[in-house]
Image (tube, helix red, strand yellow):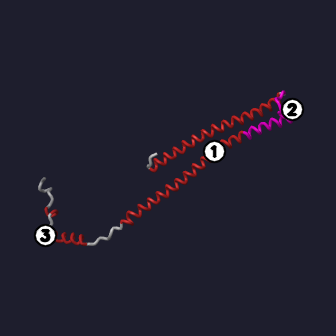
Amino acid sequence: MSPSSSPSPSLYAPSKSQGHSQKRAIAEVISETFPPFNHRTVVVEPFDNEAKRDADFTEKLNVMLLELLLDFHAWSTSRPTHESDQTADTLEKDIKAVIEMEKEQGMFSPPTSVPTSLVGTRIFLAFSLLASLDLCLEDADYFLKRKNRQRLNDFVTRIKLALAALTGLTA
């Protein structure tokens, strides 16, 4: 290092008068009483408030998820019944339309036995189809319910896993 770039000794080594005033200033600083650190208002209360807010949020989230699951369950159980009723109503309307048309043409006879006429055969087949369709709908309703239960179970499992991932819990 060159002599011109070395720091001046007066910057690092205080003179006696500067050292005495510095010591006095340090002694005064040390002897001062500092205001007490209120850890309760600075650390504890904000932490408690945050924890309370998190607990409130978790509770509200749980209530919302429970309501969602109940609504989804109600929807999934009523849907197959509604669809079956709707299909049955549509078929009944179609059959009534055929019966009305046959009445207008004067060819309607109620199906008491196996009909011999072509129009009567169509009505008999329509009623037979309706009966067999009703049985098929019951079977389809059973399989739809099973499938919907499985889908609902998978949905609930996914929601639980998502909640576990969000809250850091293990599944």
The residue at the point 16 percent across, 62 percent down is: 12
Residue type at mark 2 is Met
Q: Please tell me whether residue 107 belongs to the stretch shown in magenta.
A: yes
Residue type at mark 3 is Lys
Residue 163 in picture, x, y percent from top left: 49, 48
Q: Earlier in the sequence, mark 1 or mark 3?
A: 3
Depicted 76 relative to depicted 45: above or below? above
Q: Is residue 152 left or right of residue 25?
A: right
Q: Seen from this angle, which residue lies furthest right?
A: 106
Label ID, residue 16: 3
Residue 79 in picture, x, y percent from top left: 65, 43
- Element at label 1: helix
Label ID, residue 89: none
Residue 107 in picture, x, y percent from top left: 86, 32
The residue at the point 12 percent across, 54 percent down is: 2
Q: Main secondary structure of the magenta part?
A: helix
Q: Please tell me whether residue 123 belongs to the stretch shown in magenta.
A: no
- Element at label 2: loop
Q: Nearer the viewer, mark 1 or mark 2?
A: 1
Label ID, residue 107: 2
Q: Earlier in the sequence, mark 3 or mark 2?
A: 3
Span colored in magenta: 88-116
Question: CA gap, disc 1 to disc 2?
Answer: 43 Å
Q: Seen from this angle, which residue lies furthest left?
A: 3
Tell whether label 3 touches label 1 (CB within 8 Å).
no
